[in-house]
Image (cartoon, rainbow, N blue to C red):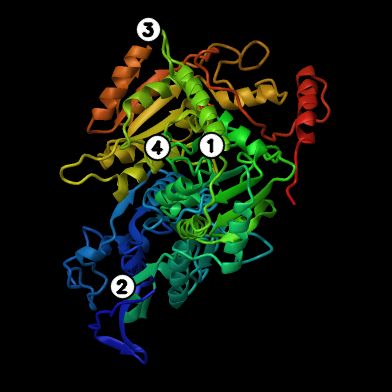
Amino acid sequence: MSPTSPARTAPSANAHGPTRRLTTAQALVAFLARQYTERDGRRQRLISATWGIFGHGNVAGIGQALVEAGPRGNGDGNGGGANGNANGHSGAGAAHRMPYLQGRNEQAMVHAAVGYARQSGRLSAHAVTTSIGPGATNLVTGAALATINRLPVLLLPGDTFATRPADPVLQQLEVPYAGDVSVNDCLRPVSRYFDRITRPEALIPAALQAMRVLTDPAETGAVTLALPQDVQVEAYDWPEEFFAERDWHVRRPAPDTYELETAVRAIRSARRPLIVAGGGVRHSAAEETLAAFTAATRIPVAATQAGKGALRHDHPADVGGIGHTGTATADELARTADLVIGVGTRFSDFTTASGTLFANPSVRFLHLNIAGFDAHKLAALPLVADARTGLEALTAQLAGRGYRVDPAYETEYTGAKEAWEERVEASFATPDPTARPTQTQVLGLLDALVTEDDIIVNAAGSLPGDLHKLWRTRSPDQYHVEYGYSCMGYEIPAAIGVLLADGARGGPHRPRRPVWALVGDGTYLMNPTEIVTAVQENLPLKLLILQNHGYASIGGLSEAVGAEGFGTAYRHRDADGGFTGPPLPVDLAANAASLGLRVLRATTVDDLRTALSEARDAEGPTCVYVETETPDTVSGPPPAQAWWDVPVAETASRPAAVKAREEYDRQVAARRRHL
Ligand SMILES: Cc1ncc(C[n+]2csc(CCOP(=O)(O)OP(=O)(O)O)c2C)c(N)n1
Ligand SMILES: [Mg+2]
């Protein structure tokens, strides 16, 4: 971090040099507009915009500060006091403006910020300002999602008065046992850094810590600065240095010599090594380095949800998704692997098939991860480093010693990959163009249309599993599936965030990249309202709604675990009070249209092909709506290739649960703890 020289033009000064008199909120916004990240010689704004919904907890503080710093403020570039500000320094020059984005729901604003951060390679992020109370607590889900996925987002919830002149103010929680608790304390466990700014000057260390955490590749996630509503508007003489431009270098730590040597020895003695590529490959922009490592060693690469796209789908070493939603190719390799090399993964239960996937009795793990916490999982040999730097070091070390997997192993996985490809083709095939499409046929039609420019965004329902197994990822950032938190309702706002990110923005001669939000009907109903934001910003969101009248994924899971599909269909009540009546007369296409989207309804395979193509070419926000057919054996997805631990009732009166428990006990018996 190397601050450049601040403008020393302030008329006032204290013992430590010139100062500016600003409110806490004005100072925070001015500070945020002057933070930059730098990595690999590229420099960009760290906080490039602020999302907000205003209420009494932020309207006069952060809200007023955003007016001063935004396009409607006194942003004439010389700090002139167009609005009568005596010091004239809260006004933002063009480079230091703080653009404002208007959201409809606080959780959705965080999702949008997360989509933006991921698409920006974690080098640029958004802030989110809310009122106190419900506005603030609506952030909790988004914060958890950001933190779990290690994606930076700065949360600025308003908080109740620090001076407590009139407790309880509107929306204030009072707990009898502690006077200093507010609802914002809910954000502590889901934040990587949390502070409550109860005095203006406390902002200085807090803001610097917040930037440190946001730009730390091992630490990053949601960062929360809770801002009591009285402190936001309180004036203070800020040291001018606080407003200097600061560059936050995003580091690429190199591996420790001992860990590197241990890793190289482990790889050289492996006969059936398998790489598990996670989101860390993407965050480190290590895709090409991974390809070079694979070219040298021919070690096959399986991918988690966050890592899919680390290699192109047609790269000879790409064996597809791994784990519960993985391909047969990857999962078979995992069962026999003697060395599993994790690169930037959290080794979630989906990846390990809840501890049943890595079945070779002598399997060992090696884990290249920037976070020591993850690098040590599964009793792995840790290789704590940036993914790119670590892979470069491994490649260099192994190249000198001529390591390459046995050609028979390469032939084996190449053959298995071809066999899986035939299953993908079978799932995508549309023998009857006049029929209603199944979900996998919908994916097949989209697959036939997209190029490496397209980006697909998804998070929950049955789509993530189908996509993980079947999607042919054509570019490193095409596959944007949030599966750390798998949060229904992420898709639409996140797609907006992706569209706002530089990576998706076309130049004057290049249209924006097509960004598709793929949602089930349940997911749509959870959180459709950010459509209005896409319309407001004229972002060419492409929303694909797949109607199957309920929570089909959970319905299937429920059947499998003895819960008989209970409560998962969107149907009228029957005479017994269950939900087995006719589907509900809900028209999601009309709903999307009412929020401002152009909607293309498709009934048949042929309709859908046309509608998708029209949507892809559309310049404005567009929705394709299709009702899907329940899959048959030809066009359904391949079944799960590995287990997932969802505990089943140990005792029950109903036969479905008793039977499911027998199967559960069989599966649990195969679980291993890798120690
Ligand atoms: C916010 C949230 N609530 C609940 C869940 C649990 N859940 C996972 S998938 C799912 C159903 C999704 O329904 P839909 O979007 O229609 O997709 P489908 O299962 O029909 O493919 C539910 C309730 C979740 N992932 N996120
Ligand atoms: Mg559904």
Is label 1 in a helix, a strand or a loop?
helix
Q: Separation of disc 4 and disc 3 at Cα?
A: 29 Å
The quadrant where ligand 1 appears is top right
Q: On the image, numbered disc 1 is attached to which residue? A: 410
Q: Separation of disc 4 and disc 2 at Cα?
A: 34 Å
* Residue 416 percent across, percent down from the top left: 54, 28
Q: What's the amino acid at mark 2?
A: Glu
Q: What's the amino acid at mark 4?
A: Ile
Is label 2 in a helix, a strand or a loop?
loop
Q: Residue 243 is drawn in which quadrant?
A: bottom left
Q: Is residue 375 left or right of residue 239?
A: right
- Is residue 201 or residue 604 the one in the foreground? 604
Q: Separation of disc 2 and disc 3 at Cα?
A: 60 Å
Q: Earlier in the sequence, mark 2 or mark 3?
A: 2
Q: Earlier in the sequence, mark 4 or mark 3?
A: 3
* Residue 460 percent across, percent down from the top left: 52, 34
Q: Is residue 260 left or right of residue 242?
A: right
Q: On the image, numbered disc 3 is attached to which residue? A: 434
* Residue 138 percent across, percent down from the top left: 50, 48
Q: On the image, numbered disc 2 is attached to which residue? A: 245
For discs 4 and 2, the disc positioned in front in the rendered view? 2
Is residue 673 positioned above or below 236 on the image?
above
Q: Earlier in the sequence, mark 4 or mark 2?
A: 2
For discs 3 and 1, the disc positioned in front in the rendered view? 1
Residue at left offset 38%, top offset 56%: 125
Q: On the image, numbered disc 4 is attached to which residue? A: 492
Badge 1: how crowded within 10 Å, few (<14), some, or many (20+)? some
State whether residue 463 appears in this view. yes
Is label 4 in a helix, a strand or a loop?
helix
Badge 4: how crowded within 10 Å, few (<14), some, or many (20+)? many
Q: Separation of disc 3 and disc 1 at Cα?
A: 42 Å
